[in-house]
Amino acid sequence: MIVVQDKGIQEKLVTQVKKASQLHGQPSLAEKAALQKIENLSLPNIRDEDWRYADLDFLLQAGFDRASTLDQQEINTTAIEKIVSEFSNSNLIVFVNGVFSESMSRVTGDNIQITNDLNLKNGLSDDWEHLENPFFYYLNQSSPSSNLKIDLKGIDKEIPLLIIHLDQLSANTDFPIFQPSISITLSANSEASIVEHYLNQNTDPHFRNGVIHINLEENSVLNYQKIQNDSRQAHSLSNTFIYQAAGSQISHGSYQLGSTWSRNCTQVSYSGANTFTDLYGIAIGSETQYLDQSIKLNHTQSHADSRQLFKYVLSDKSKGVFNGKILVQENASALNAQQDNHNLLLSESAEMNAKPQLEISNEDVKCSHGSTIGQLDENALFYLRARGINEKMAKSILTEAFVTQVLENLSYKVTSNYIKTIIQQKLNL
Amino acid sequence: MLNIKALSVNVEGKSVLSGVDLDVNPGEVHAIMGPNGSGKSTLANVLAGKSEYQVISGKVQFSGNDFLTLSPEERALQGLFLGFQYPVEIPGVSTENFLKTALNEKLKFEGKEELDAFDFQQLLSEKLQQINMDKSMTDRSLNQGFSGGEKKRNEILQMLVLDPKLTVLDEIDSGLDIDALKQISSGINQYKSDKNAVILVTHYQRLLNYITPDFVHVLMNGRIVMSGDYTLAQQLEEKGYEWIQAEPAVA
């Protein structure tokens, strides 16, 4: 049964890609190569350890809609302007339905260079394919909605580059697939911060299969925050590839707050020593939301520090998945890797699936991990209520306290306050 | 103010209180003393509404209203304050924000205007001074990493800020050194007025050297077996609890 279903989804997606290509004109060589990949690879399914809980049946309804043109008049920019003003009118890159919008984006100065080129090929080395089934990466590359290259030199970290994905227009297809692809390179010895914000008021179901490559050159330092506050009709898959050269540092926060189905696949690989990788996130689920983080660090280089801290708050019938894999290769020594995943279940029907994995092939490594699943502390709840704070409010206060620790990783005030506010709204504070 | 009649309480099916009677009026300080396991803490927690205590029979009225049907937060808003024997550590919730939320909930309930950040700061620093507590304590997470004495002082600070009608302090003196004991007693004495009442639940007479109770009750085996004035506490200090057990119950 399952096999037939998988094949059905895969065949449908391949047909859809071909159809979309014809509408678009001649597919590029890169697109053709990617198409060949998705014809030959198998769609991830529940037999894959990493995809065990990810139900992909919704893909049977999804299809491409590349022919539809966007009418700028129809785009409601109020939400975007509100965010931009919170971030001191920073540089702005906007995607609408997965397509880069030149007219809505505002980039000034020489320190940010952008090129949009659908024929651009984003390479994926063999390393990645061992880590994670690359089907969705190639699906994206076989028919990208946009392919934006961003070259960053140092920018003021307190004023982040904003990347906003607005999926707002109702398209001609019932269940459209949007496939933005972004490739960011941060120059050697420079620092930058990026806030990527997924935002939509779209009430129609859609699937966004996004790819983002982040290349950190030597000694560069990036702060990258990803806020996913999609509508409950969104299905969101994020494929994030981080390449770290010697001496580079990344602080990456991911906030899964919206979508009915959301999976973030984050993979990190290294080309040099003395790197620092700090990954953290908050997932807040209710109703029947599915929130999934799949993290893979492939330590091939020595003298590296990595930290992970992910917290989930799940209520109603929501389901969370955390797969955190740390690979330490034989030649990688003097390593510090730490992973923590803590989960709060606010209802009996909520479900958390946590799977830390450490695969270590070197002796000179300090690795630790901790994972907990629990409920709110009854004694703490009683303590607050005994001071006249009602039960609902007391629960919100304790829940916020539980996730707040994650935000302590964020040293930039504006960004951290912004995220805190969104999270408080989610928790009804 | 508080009228407890024939209160019997079970915990996990076991009888802990069996027929407690107690009347507390405004302006009074009551001490409830007794050996370990006599039901003192149960009485305090039942009044505050902790859910694992099952009231089997009896009545508790507060200002004439049935208290036992109310939720813990409703009891607090009516004017009850329980100072915990073991204050809970709550990481991530700042003491100051917690206190401000609690106070504003109370003011809202009373139909009064809520305090803004500035007015609250003023009130807080005034109360901190009363018990010689440093402002930095309230910037920290609630009770997290506090010493035993700091936790108890924090309970007294909360009492002073919330200014309840009835304060029940459960073993507020346990684990305190003499300086902390003096500061806490001074806080309680500053709070005391002819409009409010205090119930001190304690094992030792020590605290009563600093706060003179109007009534002393001895709770044993789930019942108040003896009541008297301050001199009863002195007798207990000299003779321990055993001599009471030997005597026939005097109510």
Image (cartoon, coloured by chain):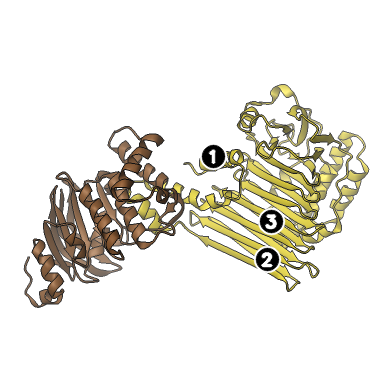
Please say if A236 is above or below A109. below
Q: Which residue is mark 1?
A: A421
**Disc 1 and disc 3 in contact, CB within 8 angstroms:** no
Give the chain letter at badge 3: A
Marks 1 and 2, the one that precedes in the sequence: 2
Q: Amino acid at mark 2?
A: Gln
Q: Report the number of discs.
A: 3
Q: CA distance from mark 1 to mark 3?
A: 26 Å
How dense is the environment of label 1, judged by Cα within 10 Å: few (below 14), some, or many (20 and up)?
few
Instruction: Please name which of the two marks, 1 or 3, marks the residue nearer to the observer.
Output: 1
A387 and A112: which is toward the camera: A112
Task: Give the residue at mark 2.
Answer: A357
Q: Secondary structure at mark 1?
A: helix
Q: Amino acid at mark 1?
A: Thr
Q: Residues within 10 Å of mark 2 (few under 14, many from 20)?
A: some
Q: Is residue A193 visible?
A: yes
| Alpha-carbon span between mark 2 and mark 3 | 11 Å
